[in-house]
Amino acid sequence: MSQTRKVRKAVFPVAGLGTRFLPATKAVPKEMLTVVDKPVIQYVVDEALDAGIEHLIFVTGRSKAVIEDYFDIQVELEQTLRQRNKTAELTLLESILPVAGSTSFTRQQEPLGLGHAVWCARELVGNEPFALLLPDMIMKAEKGCMKGMVELFEHSGANVIAVEECAPDQAHKYGIVGVGEKVGDGFAITKMVEKPVPGTAPSNFFINGRYILQPEIFPILANQERGAGNEIQLTDAMVKLAGDQKFAAYHFRGETYDCGAKDGFILANIAFALARADIRPSVEGPLKDLVAKLK
Ligand code: G1P
């Protein structure tokens, strides 16, 4: 097991259809919907880069080409900005451009589940530990979730999964872990269940969409049969890997917004807008008035 190697690569599964956001997602991938003024995917990529990730691997699908364009230069736009002396805008575009050669794109041809999407990245990841970030979930915290996970990975050598607590009646919506002894900032994982039947969850710690996994997950995924929702589930493959390797949970204590759901997406927009010094003054008052008028 290559446990002490640096986590250099991150996988972003972005092939999902985004049916919960129709009609918007008929022509725009859900990962490109904006939270304040940045697409959702930018928040997740920033979290990975902040954790020291050097290579970004996107598992895309048909009609997601705009994600690839977003992480490239836009020649006409930049020329026009230059002609108009729009220096601030140009600097902003430069600051989000990934280093040349640090992005890769592959396609998940059929929607067979998260486990299958991750497996599609196997050749691009190769034989080294990798980060996995589900782009629906965006996080707000002093220390980025993935940054804390990399520290726990380096300290423990275990596969690391970030978890948070949920209301017990929400556990059936997520992957849930069983709690073992303390490991660094987190704890050893004794059990993992994908979308447990209500009343059977081993705890209320749910998998929040951030993982650091060893490459031995790939041969398991190659043979993984379908599980919950008739999809190839990553959690089921992790259960098998846990027979041979350690898994630790990183207890993330910041705010998480599920931008794959309308309420989470709207709350993310409000929270990130209120955190911005240039926006808060003109939003806070009207927002309070709106809430006060609610009957
Ligand atoms: C996936 C994972 C699940 C995790 C969730 C977090 O489920 O399979 O374990 O808790 O993401 O968002 P999905 O949301 O794709 O159903």
Image: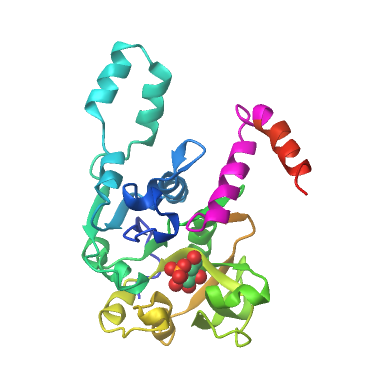
Residue 208, image x, y percentages: 53, 65
Quarter of the figure that contains the N terminus: bottom left
* Depicted 246 relative to depicted 131: above or below: below
Pinpoint residue 153: horizontal percent, then vertical percent.
48, 65
Left or right of residue 76, residue 208 in this image: right
Picture quadrant where residue 178 is located:
bottom right
* Residue 273 drawn in magenta: yes
Q: Is residue 246 above or below residue 48?
A: below
Q: Which coloring applies here?
A: rainbow
**Residue toward you, 26 or 244:** 26
Q: Can you give x and y, in whole percent of width and height, for residue 24 in the image? A: 40, 48
User: Is residue 171 something one can see in this rendering?
Assistant: yes
Lateral position of residue 66 relative to residue 50, left or right: left
**What's drawn in magenta, residue-wise?**
258-282
Farthest residue in the front direction?
295
From this viewpoint, is residue 158 visible?
Answer: no
Taking depth in this image into account, of 230 and 120 the one nearest to the observer is: 230
At horizontal 43% and vertical 83% (from top left) the residue drawn is: 239
Residue depicted at 64% across the width and 59% down the height? 253
Counting every numbered tag in the picture gives: 0
The picture places residue 71, in percent across and down from the top left corner, at 30, 41
Q: Kindly report the secondary structure that dominates the magenta region of the rendered protein.
A: helix
Q: Is residue 191 left or right of residue 76?
A: right
Residue at the image position 53 percent from the left and 51 percent from the top: 265
Q: Give the image quarter of residue 121.
A: bottom left
Question: Residue at point 38% right, 36% down?
Answer: 96
Q: Is residue 167 magenta?
A: no
